[in-house]
């Protein structure tokens, strides 16, 4: 189910909220409220593919049992380590099979075919939506309990609610258990938080409908073209740069808003990444919950920056490689991660500064975002060859097709120019939707609702529009 679908907006969400707050007004226990959330989360997740619920439930059960073994009184170090290993193995195993089996077998078949052998038959494996998110979230719980930085959960229904929370289930933000443990046990519901949640949800919905979907039309047309010209290729790449940001930011804001309505405070996931002055800074403000996950559970355990120079560079390389692999089973994602690793290593070698750090701030931001833009081409392309063709077009090395003029007429309309200008303004201007939505006032609430109503009307004219990060 998708937040921006009519099914969710007009049926699922109203039904859920009415049922939830009826139970709350009847003074239901938090365990009952959590169970109610879990049931609706399973309905939300398994609406089109019910088997997905059984997979998530199985992974949840294994991690819950592992957490109990890890925290059991008198448990030996070996027992605790085995329990942690089981929790990680099950989640990584499920992730590896469902997300990387076909990619891995494709590599194997390419190799053995070149050696003159018959390729293996490869069965089709469907990727469960959100598995990358809930598997990382579950593993963080097991690791934190093992480290002693998070309290173990005694009630399975509470842990199932934590894993399955539908507001952030399929595309984050990745929530650490210790940040919501108290709210799972005893959260308060206030009108102020509910209104703040509505503002976040309305603003995020508008981001999706008015920005991500609109500039996405431009990006799709350019990337589908055989040989776009220089101007068109830059325009389409810039459109995708805006699309990926506002699409993901929209989901995060809607998730944060839904969480606030239910008394949960989810972490901020973006903080003006396109105003960054270096690639290192960019990753401090882009997909913050994932970046912090890799920092705390991979980078720091590897030694972080407390090691020698060569090991430090290796740590950066490995973290960004894994980040690329996490995003998708395609060489484009692997290369995208390594592309960012290269610039982060260069900046680290330059005392954490970009090689252009002495330039004026505006120039630093511009160069950084051009680097990010070229990286997004890799991220968007279906293959390395397609990314290479787009780069060549951007640099003027591709012959322009006769259809390029027609493409220009389609993507430089007044409507396209308006939405691209609006996206650029909100990306580079110091307007922070998170801060704006965090403050409650009648005027802000009226603006949020007005934007939401207009976005609802626009939704009826648009086709199916899933969030981009659902595929990860």
Image (spheres, helix red, strand yellow):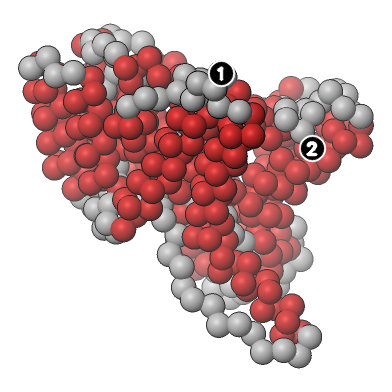
Please tell me whether mark 1 sits on a helix, a strand or a loop: loop
Q: Residue 151 location, x and y as percent?
A: 47, 19
Residue of label 2: 315
Measure the C-alpha gap from mark 1 to mark 2.
24 Å
Pick the residue in front: 348 or 84.
Answer: 84
Q: Residue at the location (50% across, 21% down)?
A: 73
Q: Residue at the location (30% across, 48% down)?
A: 45
Q: Residue at the location (25% across, 27% down)?
A: 34
Residue of label 1: 149
Q: Going by the image, does 189 lie left or right of 147?
A: left
Q: Earlier in the sequence, mark 1 or mark 2?
A: 1
Q: Going by the image, does 283 lie left or right of 346?
A: left
| Residue 150 in sight here | yes
Q: Residue 154 location, x and y as percent?
A: 37, 25
When asked about the image quadrant of residue 458, the answer is top left
Q: Residue at the location (29% across, 32% down)?
A: 157
Q: Residue 185 location, x and y as percent?
A: 32, 17
When asked about the image quadrant of residue 311, the answer is top right
């Amino acid at each position: 189910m998708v937040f921006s679908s009519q099914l969710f907006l007009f049926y699922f969400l109203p039904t859920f909220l009415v049922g939830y707050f009826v139970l709350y007004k009847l003074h239901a226990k938090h365990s009952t409220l959590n169970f109610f959330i879990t049931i609706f989360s399973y309905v939300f997740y398994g609406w089109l593919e019910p088997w997905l619920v059984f997979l998530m439930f199985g992974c949840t059960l294994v991690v819950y049992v592992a957490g109990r073994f890890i925290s059991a009184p008198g448990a030996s170090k070996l027992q605790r380590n085995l329990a942690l290993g089981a929790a990680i193995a099950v989640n990584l195993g499920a992730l590896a099979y469902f997300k990387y089996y076909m990619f891995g077998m494709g590599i194997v078949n390419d190799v053995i075919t070149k050696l003159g052998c018959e390729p293996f038959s490869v069965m089709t494996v469907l990727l469960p939506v959100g598995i990358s998110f809930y598997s990382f979230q579950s593993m963080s719980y097991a690791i934190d309990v093992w480290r002693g930085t998070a309290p173990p959960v005694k009630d399975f229904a509470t842990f199932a609610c934590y894993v399955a929370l539908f507001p952030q289930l399929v595309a984050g933000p990745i929530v650490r258990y210790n940040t919501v443990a108290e709210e799972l046990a005893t959260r308060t519901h206030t009108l102020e938080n509910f209104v703040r949640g509505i503002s976040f949800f309305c603003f995020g919905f508008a981001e999706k409908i008015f920005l991500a979907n609109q500039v996405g039309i431009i990006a799709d047309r350019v990337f589908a073209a055989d040989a776009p010209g220089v101007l068109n290729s830059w325009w389409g790449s810039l459109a995708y740069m805006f699309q990926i940001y506002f699409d993901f930011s929209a989901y995060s804001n809607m998730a944060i808003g839904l969480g606030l309505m239910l008394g949960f405070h989810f972490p901020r996931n973006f903080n003006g990444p396109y105003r960054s002055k270096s690639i290192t800074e960019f990753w401090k403000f882009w997909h913050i919950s994932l970046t912090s996950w890799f920092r705390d559970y991979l980078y720091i355990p590897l030694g972080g920056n407390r090691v020698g120079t060569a090991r430090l560079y290796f740590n950066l390389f490995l973290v960004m490689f894994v980040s690329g692999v996490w995003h998708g089973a395609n060489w484009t994602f692997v290369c995208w991660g390594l592309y960012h690793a290269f610039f982060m290593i260069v900046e680290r070698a330059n005392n954490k500064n970009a090689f252009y750090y002495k330039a004026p701030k505006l120039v630093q931001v511009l160069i950084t975002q051009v680097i990010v833009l070229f990286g997004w081409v890799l991220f968007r392309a279906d293959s390395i060859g397609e990314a290479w063709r787009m780069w060549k077009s951007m640099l003027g090395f591709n012959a322009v097709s006769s259809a390029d003029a027609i493409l220009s007429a389609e993507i430089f309309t007044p409507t396209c120019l308006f939405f691209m200008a609006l996206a650029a303004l909100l990306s580079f201007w110091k307007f922070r939707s998170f801060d704006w939505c965090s403050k409650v006032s009648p005027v802000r609430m009226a603006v949020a609702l007005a934007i939401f109503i207009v976005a609802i009307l626009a939704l009826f004219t648009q086709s199916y529009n899933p969030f981009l990060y659902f595929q990860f």
